[in-house]
Amino acid sequence: MLDRPDLLERLSQIVGPKHVLTGTDAEPFSRDWSGHYRWSPRAVVRPADAAEVSEVLKLANAERCPVVPMSGNTSVSGGTTAEGAIVLSLVRMNRIRKIDPQTQIAVVEAGVILSNLHDAADAEEMIFPLTFGARGSALIGGCLSTNAGGSNVLRYGNTRDLCLGLEVVLPDGRIMDLMSELHKNNTGLDLRHLMIGAEGTLGIITAAVLKLHPKPKAVATAMIAPRDLNVALELLNRLNDATGRGVDAFEYMPRSHIDGHLALSSSAREPFEDRHEVNVLLEVSSTRPVDARTDTDGATALTLLLETELSQLLETGDIADAIIARSESQRREMWERREAAAEVAYTREPRVDSDIALPLDKVAGFFDAAMDRLRSLDPGVSNISVTHLGDGNIHYCVYPSRDDERLKDDIREAVEQIVSDRGGSFSAEHGIGIHKLPTMKRRKDEVALDVMRAIKDAIDPNGILNPGKVFPARD
């Protein structure tokens, strides 16, 4: 239907001819970050504001044209696959409308790059604490649509926990104004939370009111090598108690990840002089001026506190090694090791990747149970992983010894079952897209799926918004 010249002309009238892309101009919008998913959109439309989004959706809804919203396109779940659809790119909607340190909020458009919001908040001595490796290209709209997590969930929560209000354009073009700056607003169903994490299937988020936090006055970062993974949770609780709940990140990297990172980057280095199986990136921060006081060597009180705690853990044997960053460059090196996780994982094929969550006390036992089960399916199997250890989110990537689709399906089901047996979730922060549709069908409560489909049908009866994502088809 989009081959009709008059329809493309009508889109051009809404957003301007140079903002309707086709053919080779649409190539950058025709694949995901990983390169695994590729498609051919009929057109890419780049609106400048919510009013233009509204007009595009009114037209698409009347003509029954599928529309796939696209933010920074950093998804690894196929959430932006758009074969034959209009790709609605939000890149032009990139204004930071307000940063208010007094009320600690930011009002932003959906096309704002996450790192740009970080910079704007920093200029006002504030932070927007959501952070992950793709922050230089991920857009706020995509973060909200997938309820992104990242490395600071332990202290600040997911994106859902950082949002006060939304502006959303519905499939029929109506603009729903939920741009509240209130921390309490008990006026019926919370439609804001319905839209967050819906992956653009119910509406297109065009703006948001976000929570900011005071910029820490002191930050201390370290690599530690716990004796084993079982003791790591105890260490997290102890360090949180010692720092007044100051732990921002507690990121587990097994030996396989360290080796993968060393192979990926010529500038990478071992985190310690000795090799360790359990490696954890730890970061704590404080907004208290007393914790930012420095000694004669320039070390902050917070760093000295962390040093004291780690020294005691070394003496008891709870950790085998520890290195505290003494400069910003050392801190960045530690974080680069962790944030290269996606690149490390995607260097090998064949691959079965998963993004799972477990209760905190079930994380350690998962790894042995998983490998025992997977080796029974494929004796030559290997894996690599990184874990947000403080919130139980494991990015678990399995490498079968052969490229066999049946084997890969068996591996997926085995991982799912092990996670389910431990009360976990098969999707933690990367969204469902199309990648996890079979798992949704197998594992999600059938009544819950019926309710989700009913909501989709009620809000988008013509099924134009991001069709084929999130909700598995009915039997």
Image (cartoon, rainbow, N blue to C red):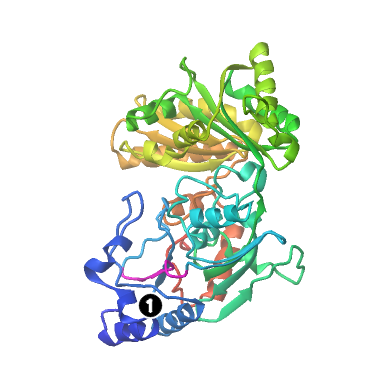
Mark 1 is surrounded, within 10 Å at the Cα level, by few (under 14), some (14 to 19) or many (20 or more) other residues, namely: some
**Nearer to the camera, 447 or 27:** 27
**Magenta highlight: main SS:** loop
Q: Which quarter shows the N terminus?
A: bottom left
Q: Which x, y percent locates residue 15?
A: 38, 80
119 in relation to 251, above or below: below
The percent coordinates of residue 26 (x first, y second) are 28, 67
Q: Residue at x 51, y 66 (%)?
A: 110
Q: Which residues are magenta?
A: 84-93
Q: Residue at x 52, y 23 (%)?
A: 278
| Residue 147 placement: quadrant | bottom right
Left or right: residue 208 versus residue 59 is right
Identify the residue shown where x is 60% and y is 59%: 448
Q: Would residue 46 be counted in the magenta stretch?
A: no
Kindly tell me whether residue 454 is visible in this rendering. no
Q: Quadrant of residue 397?
A: top left
Q: Which residue is mark 1?
A: 65
Element under disc 1: loop
Describe residue 217's horizontal placement relative to residue 202 as left or right.
Answer: right
Image spot of residue 86 (x, y percent): 36, 72
Amino acid carrying label 1: it is Cys
x 62%, y 28%: residue = 298
Can residue 180 be seen by looking at this rendering? yes
Please, is residue 108 above or below residue 4 in the view? above
Q: Nearer the viewer, residue 268 or 214?
A: 214
| Drawn side of residue 74 relative to residue 361, left or right | left
In the visual, does 192 lie left or right of 356?
right
Q: How many marks?
A: 1
- Coordinates of residue 77 in the picture (x, y in percent): 42, 52
Q: Report the front residue among 389 and 212.
A: 212
